Amino acid sequence: MRYRAWVFANQLQKGSKIPTDIRLLDYLQSDDIFYLKESFSSCAVDPKGAEIIHSQRRTFYNHAHCCVEEYLPADKRLYVLGYLDTRHHLNTEVAIQKEVKTLITEWKASPSKMLLRFDHDRSGKVDMQECEKARTEARREVEIKHQMQAHMQMYTLAKPKNNQLYLISALSPHALHNQYKCWRFVHLDILALILLIYFRLV
């Protein structure tokens, strides 16, 4: 669940219902990666740099503090517009080489199995040429494993590198359209009012 929260001072003057001290004391936000899940697949979402439109908001009071929270509710639909990285993070040359080395070490830990699999000339030892074939086979197995992981595991949604819009919204695209349309009319009304005041002053 992605959230942000504000903590304000909430001190009341005696006999008054209106706070006299509403200073912002603290601000918190969660930038932790969260996951979108469907029936047979999932996607990691990195919220850093995103414009986030929350649908849930609550206010509560704790002694002399007023706490305000906005959050994306769990188990609800989200609309995300960003960069989808379909390459699994394991599919890097460094990761592949590291796992190839680990796999060969595991094979060497069972000399009898190593000989049975790679001692093709039956000399009783694995020579340099056969070691190279073993390394090639290990890399092939690792690459197949990573390809399967990239297909079965999750992709990643993140902020586009070209500074295009990165949006995470608890509102549907239709609701977003209506909201932005409403704000556009509000801004036009404010602009018209400013112009009217300006011309009257002039």
Image (cartoon, rainbow, N blue to C red):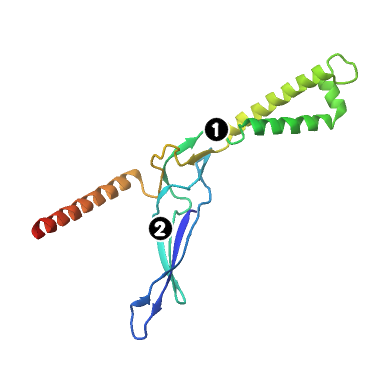
Q: CA distance from mark 2 to mark 1?
A: 33 Å
Q: Position of residue 133 (x, y in %)?
A: 76, 19
Q: Secondary structure at mark 2?
A: strand
Closer mark to the observer between disc 2 and disc 1:
1
**Residue drawn at point x = 88 percent, y = 21 percent:** 125
User: Mark 1 highlights which residue?
Assistant: 87
Q: Of the residues shown, which amino acid type is indicated by label 2? A: Gln
Q: Position of residue 26 (x, y in %)?
A: 47, 66
**Residue drawn at point x = 61 percent, y = 30 percent:** 148
Q: Position of residue 44 (x, y in %)?
A: 52, 43
Query: Which image quarter holds the C terminus?
Result: bottom left
Q: Is residue 23 above or below residue 69?
A: below
Disc 2 + disc 1, Cβ < 8 Å: no
Which label belongs to residue 195?
none
Q: Is residue 169 above or below residue 144?
A: below
Q: Position of residue 43 (x, y in %)?
A: 51, 41
The first of marks 2 and 1 along the sequence is: 2
Q: Of the residues shown, which amino acid type is indicated by label 1? A: Arg
Compare residues 131 and 171 and report the one nearer the observer.
131
Q: Secondary structure at mark 1?
A: loop
Q: Is residue 153 above or below residue 50?
A: above
User: Mark 2 highlights which residue?
Assistant: 56
Q: Label 1 neighbourhood size at 10 Å, few (<14), some (14-19), many (20+)?
A: some
Q: Label 2 neighbourhood size at 10 Å, few (<14), some (14-19), many (20+)?
A: few
**Residue drawn at point x = 24 percent, y = 49 percent:** 184
